[in-house]
Image: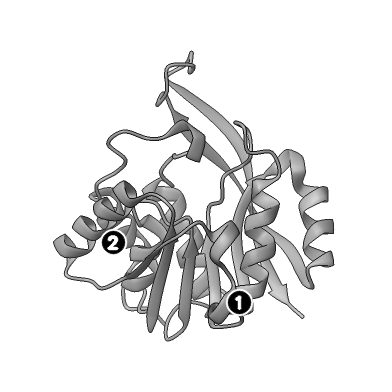
Amino acid sequence: MTSITLRKLEAWLQELDRFEKPKVLLEQYCTSAHVASQILYCAEVQFGDIQGRTVADLGCGCGHLSIGAKMLEASHVTGFEIDPDALNILSRNCDDLELFVETVQCDILQYLPGRFEKFFDTVIMNPPFGTKHNAGIDMKFLEIATKLASNTVYSLHKTSTRNYVLQKAAQYGAKGKVIAEVKFDIPQSYKFHKQYYVDIEVDFIRFELN
């Protein structure tokens, strides 16, 4: 059982640096400290999938999920990210907290799984939803995650796509269960945004590998 409380985990994640100039084509939105702490704490306290486990974070961005997993005492965490600017922010965040998260800069759609196949106990991710020039990318992330994980995958997906996501997961050899429905607050980050915040209904899903 983790020694850190949920409130403390969220407070620490709240202090992390975020994207300075988010890139629209990469759908860069930070996972909020509240959402990140809730899903990580659930993965650990309810299922024991973080502490002492090897964990991968696909599309790790600034590192909220990666760093949170390390704070919950994952034995090793590797964050995969295509954007070097995001990895620089993650590195600063790790330095500030004196934590180590291994990072791999790559396009996971081209580079993985390779030697990482079934390498990790648990994969956690907040994949692009595929809403801006990236249709279907969330399912590509999920397929790769099921190849990297030996036990479980935790992921966020738009509630409106729930049935499709669960069906595709079954094709990948994973049994998905919706753990919670959350509101994902998307701040006004790009010029095409007309509102300060938009709430998107998102499923937090646990996929168990067969």
Amino acid under disc 1? Ala
Between 47 and 71, the one lying in front of the other is 71
The residue labelled by disc 2 is 8
Marks 1 and 2 in Cβ contact (< 8 Å) = no
The residue labelled by disc 1 is 149
In the rendered structure, the answer to whether residue 81 lies left or right of residue 156 reads: left
SS category of the residue bearing label 1: strand
Between 183 and 105, the one lying in front of the other is 105
Q: Report how many numbered discs are placed on residues in the image.
A: 2
The structure residue drawn at horizontal position 71% and vertical position 44%, both measured from the top left corner, is 136
Q: Percent from the top left, x then y, of residue 146?
A: 67, 70
Does residue 47 appear anywhere in the picture?
no
In the rendered structure, the answer to whether residue 123 lies left or right of residue 14 reads: right
The quarter holding residue 119 reads bottom right
The structure residue drawn at horizontal position 42% and vertical position 81%, both measured from the top left corner, is 51
Looking at marks 1 and 2 on the same chain, the residue that comes earlier in the sequence is marked by 2
The N terminus lies in quadrant: bottom left
SS category of the residue bearing label 2: helix
The C terminus lies in quadrant: bottom right
The quarter holding residue 111 reads bottom right
Does residue 167 appear anywhere in the picture?
yes
